Image (cartoon, rainbow, N blue to C red):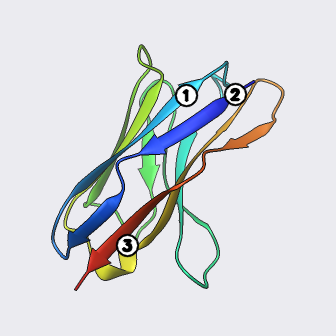
Amino acid sequence: QVQLVESGGGLVQTGGSLRLACVVSGSISNINPMEWYRQAPGKERERVAFIYSGGLANYADSVKGRFTISRDNAKNTVYLQMNSLKPEDTGVYYCHAYDNSWRSYWGQGTQVTISS
């Protein structure tokens, strides 16, 4: 059974930084990427960034140049470094992964609030 546990959210001012972490337990797919999503109030969940096990990563246009996703395979942890935060970055951030049977797993989410 795969479990994802996020941490690192909080309240920061515009321009500040946060580092989210997602600790993975259980066996996840080595083919599919690890992903960070976010969901703002009243909006659909959107993918923010993803990273493959080899390190290849990509970002939503809205966060390019400000967010950096990384992973430590030895620690089974994926990180999301968020800099130059804006009020529109506010939302609940979720970690997502697939296992080798294409079952989908989500963490419980961590709240990020950016004050103006």
Q: Is residue 111 visible?
A: yes
Q: Which mark is residue 32?
A: none
What is the number of callouts on the image?
3
Q: Amino acid at mark 3?
A: Asp
84 relative to 101 in the view: left or right:
left
Q: Position of residue 67 (x, y in %)?
A: 31, 56
Q: How far apart are labels 1 and 2 at the CA level?
A: 7 Å
Q: How far apart are labels 2 and 3 at the CA level?
A: 28 Å
The crowd level at tag 1 (other Cα within 10 Å; few <14, some 14-19, many 20+) is many
- The residue tagged 3 is 89
Q: Amino acid at mark 2?
A: Val
User: In the structure shown, which secondary structural element does the residue marked by tag 3 occupy?
Assistant: helix
* Location of residue 52 with respect to 10 vertically, above or below: above
The crowd level at tag 3 (other Cα within 10 Å; few <14, some 14-19, many 20+) is many
Q: Amino acid at mark 1?
A: Val
Q: Position of residue 11 (x, y in %)?
A: 28, 67
User: Which label lies toward us, 2 or 3?
Assistant: 2
User: In the structure shown, which secondary structural element does the residue marked by tag 1 occupy?
Assistant: strand
Q: Nearer the viewer, residue 47 or 39?
A: 39
- The residue tagged 2 is 2
Identify the mark nearer the N-term, 2 or 3: 2
Q: Position of residue 28 (x, y in %)?
A: 66, 24
Q: Is residue 33 visible?
A: no
Q: How far apart are labels 1 and 3 at the CA level?
A: 24 Å
Identify the mark nearer the N-term, 1 or 2: 2
